[in-house]
Image (spheres, rainbow, N blue to C red):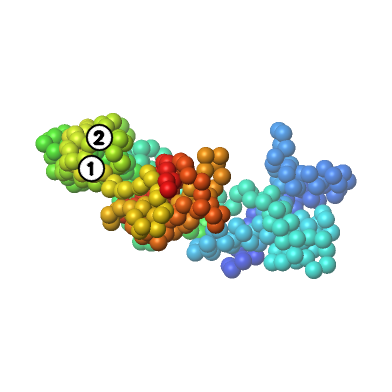
Amino acid sequence: WLDVARYADTVGFHGDQNQRIFPYRDYVIRAFNANKRFDQFTLEQLAGDLLPNATTEQRIASGFNRLNMMTREGGAQAMEYLIKYQADRVRTVGGAWLGATLGCAECHDHKFDPFLAKDFYSMSAYFADVKQFELKITESGNPCGDDFKLSMPYRDSLSYQWYRDGIAIIGATSASLEGIEDAPGAYQVRLVGPNSCMTTLKYIYKKPQYRTTIDSVICKDESVFFHQANINVAGEYFDTLQSFRGCDSILQLRLKISAEGVDTVVAKIFEGETYMLGNQPFKKAGEFDAHFSSLYGCDSVVHLSLDFYKIFIPNALTPNGDGINDVFTIYSGNEVEEVLSLEVFDRWGGQVFSQFSLPPNDGTYGWDGTAHGKPASLGTYVWQASVRFDDGKKRVLSGSVTLLQ
């Protein structure tokens, strides 16, 4: 069983240093001598330390999970080896209790057994909280005060040497380190024991610094009080305060001045319509100044240049061939770019004319007073037109036209 559990008195990697794991060996011998039930033997080795009120014997049994090869190399990358250790535990549990070569699924789905690579890493997740490289630097005290301290667990069998940014700190040879509140950097400890040597993971120390940004917009001739001064010029300003813990607290002000000036709006409407600028109505053509309050409470002026669409649509049609008013169409100056559609309906709603994409002011396009190829009955007809103007707007116009002899 000790071979299956990969028991050894040395770590297996690099210097192959000794490790004091013999209590697990003695546990196995006692279990065999006592003919311990196999289910209990299994439970204690896989999770003995997690049992309620676990005994020392059960905790020792869970050392099964720590029998993997381990490195004591000072420059070892902790995360790399933690992954190696997890993979080793999956292979060992698979072989010892499942009788399966789960290790084949570490890099790809198993070629013969029904195991996927996903199954391999799902099982490895059960071992993700097994502590390894447990000698870590811990902090205590206020990180901005003179009581801040870094510490390592004390072992009388270990010697300590502290490093900052890879350089040994002279005289820093105890299990704790103080007086670093003004010395940011990456801290490590080199631990040397009778049969081991290792370096801890890096502890990055940087005095905490808090930052708050205020965005402010003011009107011309206004100011804002900041850093013991009234400021009325746009820009970025900084003030450094101290938090209640003594850490630096940086306050940033980004100040903008609301631009003054006159915005111009050019618009057109038909006579009889109303143009709304904000909540102010305008019905006449002309030049107007409207005063508003901006989003920031500053005065804002909008100059409105308002005009009427100049368009002529006949209300009568006399298709008698005299060349005057023979065709019903839309006339305008340069304001109409295109008549998108023109439709004419009789009083019963029947369509008597329909045409698309008509050029304005062209008497060869439009309704000539016929319906289905024959002269239409005299009377009043309803028309509807879709028109695109030179300002890009489209309007739907409608009205009536009387067909005369």
The correct choice, above or below, for 354 with respect to 348 in the image is below
Instruction: Give how far across and how far down residue 177 sits, in percent.
Output: 38, 47
Residue matched to label 2: 282
Disc 1 marks a residue whose amino acid type is: Leu
Q: Is residue 116 above or below residue 234?
A: below
Q: In which quadrant will I find the N terminus?
A: bottom right
Q: Residue at x 46, y 52 (%)?
A: 369
Q: Which residue is mark 1?
A: 306
Check disc 1 and report its element: helix, strand or loop: strand
Q: Secondary structure at mark 2?
A: strand
Residue 384 locus on image (x, y percent): 45, 45
- Real-space CA distance between mark 1 and mark 2, rounded to the nearest whole angstrom: 8 Å
295 or 332, nearer to the observer: 332
Vertical placement of residue 48 versus 105, above or below? above
Q: Position of residue 358 (x, y in %)?
A: 42, 58
Q: Amino acid at mark 2?
A: Phe
Pointer 1 local density, CA inside 10 Å: few below 14, some 14–19, many at least 20:
some
Instruction: In this rendered view, identify the residue nearer to me: 70 or 114.
Output: 114
Q: Is residue 136 above or below residue 72?
A: above
- Number of numbered callouts drawn: 2
Q: Depth check: give the residue in front, 231 or 189.
A: 231
User: Quick check: 312 left or right of 59?
Assistant: left
Mark yes or no: residue 298 visible. no
- Is residue 383 left or right of 109 when viewed as pictured? left
In the image shown, does 316 or 365 lie closer to the viewer? 316
Mark 1 vs 2, N-terminal side? 2
- Image location of residue 289, percent across then percent down: 17, 37
User: Is residue 290 rendered to the left or right of residue 339?
Assistant: left
- Residue 289 visible in this rendered orientation of the protein: yes
Mark 1 in CB contact with mark 2 (< 8 angstroms): yes
